[in-house]
Amino acid sequence: MKVGGQVDSVKVIPVKVPQVFPFPVQPAPQGWGLYLHIPFCERKCPYCDFNTYAGLEEMYERYVSALVKEIRRVGDVLGRPVVRTIFLGGGTPTVLSPQGLEALFRALNDAFAVQPNAEITCEANPGTVDRSRFQVLHELGVNRLSLGAQSFVSEELRFLGRIHDVRDIQQAVDAARSVGFENVNLDLIYGLPGQSPHAWRVSLQRALACQPTHISCYALTVEEKTSLARWVANGRVPPPDEDLQAELYMMAQDILEEAGYVHYEISNWARPGRMCQHNLIYWRNEPFLGLGAGAHACDLRRRWWLERAPHIYIRRVIGDETTVVGWEELSSQTAMAETMMLGLRLLQEGVSRSRFAKQFGVDPVVYYRSVVARLQAWGLLEVLPDRLRLTPRAYTVANRVFVEFL
């Protein structure tokens, strides 16, 4: 600037502007589903291939600080967008301190326009929660719990590496209900090596005795680079028996249907009106955001994913760098195929022909004419005036149906 006819040299100090997304994010007209990943557990289960880590307690506080900053900067860039569901998963979110959980929810409510009736779910391990922790979650606005019960047979819990016992599950459900939680899911795993139909029936019946509003049943799968994969490879345990898994799956269908649960998704049953609204966003192929180490997101034009390693994720956030480490543009063909594959997982709802036509400009029955005819001939697909859905015969071979749309 000029001072008394002199020109002073001015040193310009560059300001580092945070780069949140390396691309424009499309808005979600009906609101986002928001997933927060907490990648910590007290112990890593031998079958788990999720992005989770044990023994990193010293990182919890720094991770929460980074995630809070990420929440705020994403909300700022997207203009405090509407959020209709929130899901805290992991890992085990309840390993965080009450102060850490409170900081996350304060940031969420500041950065996003959370709908008043939003479904807010938190996963919890029955071995890491008590009444006081549930009280904190309830006061913060969590209105749905998903408890990783996995089994009600002690020997099976030990095989699965769980830190809780059978008694802890019922105590966790009772504690949750005592502070006001009405919407509770129980996760169960079936098809363990040597598992008998009787043992699976015991788990289902004891789960029903807890009177959850929702039950998820997942077949044990051998994922690469897990302890279970090494056990199978070296002959310590046999691989899962697919025929037995199919038998146990059908047993679950019969028992849960008789108990009044609606089999609304391949692996999920719910009391009427208690379907998981957050997961419905995934299955309907609607926009969702993912925040936290290794989380994924999709705005229907592209899919992206974040840095997996928690310490690098923290470093990127602190350094005002993007945490996005990869993305892909979605062609209309890919988007249509994924809409079919995901939507057909919804056993009652299926794929809405009118919604598909509105989004892609074509009736799926017309676009996939030959595939639909082939699946109908095999007795695996039902074509109704307003929707496409799997036949009951297809439930145990659903992947065979899905690959047809690829």
Image (spheres, rainbow, N blue to C red):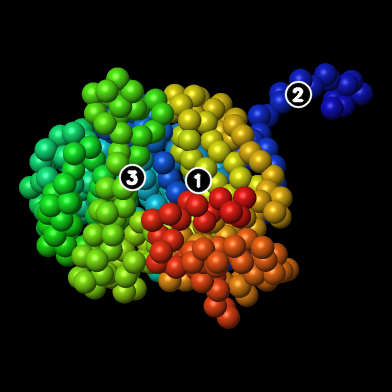
Q: Which residue is mark 3?
A: 242
Q: What residue occupies the far front of the structure in this picture?
A: 377
- Secondary structure of residue under mark 1: strand
Q: Do the residues bearing badges 1 and 3 touch, measured as CB atoms within 8 Å?
A: no
Q: Specify the quadrant of the image occupied by residue 222.
A: top left
Measured as percent of width and height from the top left, residue 210 is found at 14, 60
Q: Specify the quadrant of the image occupied by residue 262.
A: bottom left
- Secondary structure of residue under mark 3: helix
Measured as percent of width and height from the top left, residue 291 is found at 49, 42
Q: Which residue is mark 1?
A: 290
Front position in the image: 184 or 9: 184
Q: Which residue is mark 2?
A: 12
> Could you tell which of marks 1 and 2 lies nearer the N-terminus?
2
The answer to whether 382 appears left or right of 167 in the picture is: right
The residue mark sitting in front, 1 or 2, is 1
Q: What residue occupies the far left of the structure in this picture?
A: 167
- Mark 3 Cα-neighbour bin, 10 Å: few <14, some 14–19, many ≥20: some
Front position in the image: 220 or 17: 220
Kind of residue at disc 3: Glu
Residue found 25% across the figure and 59% down from its top: 252
The residue mark sitting in front, 3 or 2, is 3
